Image (cartoon, helix red, strand yellow):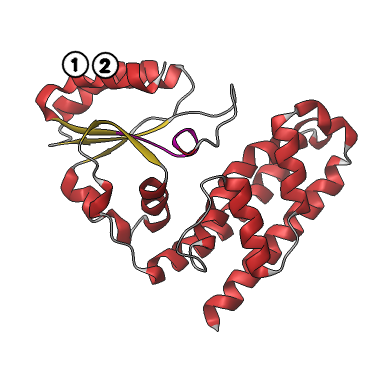
């Protein structure tokens, strides 16, 4: 299901309750990979009562069956105040988005750099812990490790793109470019990130690499990025 088709279905489901539909993320930024990237959508409505949620449920179900995440559902007032709690996501939406219906709501976003730094550090630590846990849960690492690396990459790239905002007012829309820019700022290597990105684009390349060694390098480079960000935060 295309975002435009989804938008029309949401309009029919919510009627005049709907305020805006916004496509954001890799698809809006031109960073998507055909067949591998999903569509992220933000919905603004006057209220999100059970009545409105139930009206949206059938449309959202088809949207998720097509491989997309459930939409983010905000009222305009809650969206305006979300920058304190979700600074990284709000800045990403502001920079890479396309309005599919209604007025553009992103002008109301305000983000404090301190909140951004706290979220970046929290997200990096949380995702690193999750990566270790998931690895320990693999029954046959030799078969599932490459997939784990590929599936984890995007979330780490997203956080690192948010981290780049601590050093630059404007960041590349493309996550790989942002990752390289952050590596330059922190003077760290991201070779493992680059290799995993190549494998994500062309899965057959996994056979050309020592995946356990790649995993080891990946963990080390994530740690180095985290250490450097923490060091800059304290300086």
Per the image, label 1 sits on a secondary structure element best described as: helix
Residue 31 in view: yes
Magenta residue check for 24 = yes
- Residues at marks 1 and 2 touching, judged by CB atoms closer than 8 Å: yes
Say above or below: 72 vs 180: above
Residue that mark 2 sits on: 9
Q: Residue 145: horizontal and vertical position, in percent?
A: 76, 37
Residue that mark 1 sits on: 12
Tell me which residue sits at (63%, 47%) in the image: 176
Residue density around tag 1, few if under 14, some if 14–19, many if 20 or more, within 10 Å: few
Residue 130 in view: no
Q: Residue furthest bottom?
A: 235
Magenta residue check for 143 = no
Say above or below: 234 vs 56: below
Tell me which residue sits at (69%, 63%) in the image: 223
Tell me which residue sits at (52%, 69%) in the image: 167
Give the CA distance from mark 1 to mark 2. 5 Å
Foreground pick, 61 / 38: 38
* Quadrant where the N terminus is found in the figure: top left
Tell me which residue sits at (15%, 33%) in the image: 49
Q: Which residues are magenta?
A: 22-28
């Amino acid at each position: 299901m295309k975002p435009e088709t989804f938008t029309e279905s949401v309009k029919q489901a919510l009627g005049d309750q709907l305020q805006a539909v916004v496509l954001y993320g890799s698809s809006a930024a031109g960073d998507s990979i055909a067949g591998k990237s999903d569509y992220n959508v933000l919905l603004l409505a006057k209220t999100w009562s059970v009545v409105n949620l139930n009206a949206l449920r059938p449309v959202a179900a088809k949207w998720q069956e097509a491989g997309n995440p459930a939409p983010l559902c905000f009222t305009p007032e809650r969206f305006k105040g979300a920058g304190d709690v979700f600074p990284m996501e709000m800045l990403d939406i502001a920079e890479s988005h396309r309005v599919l219906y209604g007025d553009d709501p992103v002008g109301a976003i305000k983000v404090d750099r301190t909140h951004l730094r706290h979220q970046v550090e929290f997200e990096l630590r949380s995702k690193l812990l999750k990566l270790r846990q998931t690895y320990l849960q693999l029954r046959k690492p030799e078969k599932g490790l490459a997939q784990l690396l590929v599936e984890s990459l995007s979330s780490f790239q997203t956080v690192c793109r948010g981290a780049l905002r601590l050093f630059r007012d404007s960041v590349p829309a493309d996550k790989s470019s942002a990752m390289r820019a952050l590596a330059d700022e922190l003077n760290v290597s991201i070779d493992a990130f680059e290799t995993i990105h190549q494998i994500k684009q062309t899965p057959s390349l996994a056979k050309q690499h020592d995946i356990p060694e790649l995993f080891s390098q990946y963990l080390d480079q994530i740690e180095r990025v985290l250490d450097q960000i923490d060091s800059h935060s304290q300086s």
